[in-house]
Image (cartoon, helix red, strand yellow):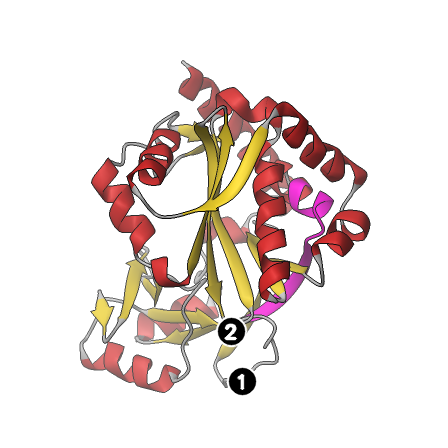
Amino acid sequence: MRLESTDFYVLGKLFRTAGIKNEWTEDIENPEAIIGELKHRRIRADLFTFWQRYPNSEPRFPYHREWDNWAVLTVTSYEDWFNHQIHRKARTAIRKAAKAGVEVRVVPLDDDYIAGVTRIFNETPIRQGKKCSHYGKSFEQVREELGKDADRTDFIGAYYRGEMIGFTQQIYAGECAHPFGDLTLLAHRDKSPNSALLAKAVEICANKGVKYVVYGFFDYGTGGGGLTEFKVRTGFKQALVPRYFVPLTFRGKLGLALRLHRGVRRLIPRRILKPMVEIRRAWRTKRGRA
């Protein structure tokens, strides 16, 4: 669904929620206009949700508000980050990548880069115990996807003996940089390419004067895990931003009142949810290897 120049998604079955498709990198300054248009077009959605961009986390709008958590790194200089903000294990991993011969650099969005990303996407259907949403994409699909924000993106590649073994697509929005992708070939994970990619992303931000690096959510509601530990070791901290929920229908008002607007999963206690997630991750990983 598209309104003016913004793409929207509609998800859910019992309670259908509309939101900005690229909410990490796009902002809503006039939500009333969007809400009015959604109602006017009679979009099949019961709720509309959006958030504010960090660091402007002081609530600005009068709608129902909850707090989402972002993983945010405050950047002053690369040297300060490397020497004072990260754990010694992270420094060891970055040095390990360099000693192993991993070279990380900013490259143009050309056919070689797109082919490398496509190869990484299609290496395995399971990553970190989850289905890889990019698995099976063609060269042309990857070209279209990477090119959407090319005018405000740095394309970063990690190379080993001339072969791309990892990539990051760093998009800039407001005062923040958002490194997306950060995927590497599993066959080369012993060389710590993910750490090298993040180091280059931080270095670029320091050189450009970008104040904040946002690495998705800090906590995905499952009690941590390997990705959260990686963020902590590399200096990221939890930052809260307001997320708003606006009912568009009576069903939406009911779902909000019953706290069903974020799905049944949010109602499961973390002590129960975490082992359930770990079991599913192990099963998917085993199936993916098979």
Of the residues shown, which amino acid type is indicated by label 2? Gln
Q: Which residue position holds label 1?
A: 60
Observer-nearest of 204 and 85: 204
Residue at 34% across, 47% down: 109
Pick the quarter of the image with the C terminus. Answer: top left
Pick the quarter of the image with the N terminus. Answer: bottom left
Q: Where does the image place residue 121, in percent across and percent down from the top left? A: 37, 33
* Label 2 vs 1, first from the N-terminus: 2
Q: Residues within 10 Å of mark 2 (few under 14, many from 20)?
A: many
Q: Residue furthest top?
A: 290
Magenta segment boundaries in residue numbering: 230-243
Q: Where does the image place residue 287, in percent across and percent down from the top left? A: 42, 19
Residue at 53% across, 84% down: 60
* Snapshot quadrant of residue 21: bottom left
Calculate the distance from the C-alpha at mark 2 to the C-alpha at mark 1.
8 Å
Q: Which residue position holds label 2?
A: 52
Q: Where does the image place residue 3, in percent across and percent down from the top left? A: 23, 73
Query: Is residue 289 on the magenta stretch?
Result: no
Q: Are the residues flagged by discs 2 and 1 in contact, CB closer than 8 Å?
A: yes
Q: Residues within 10 Å of mark 1 (few under 14, many from 20)?
A: few
Of the residues shown, which amino acid type is indicated by label 1? Arg
Please determine whether, in this image, residue 160 is positioned above or below residue 54: above
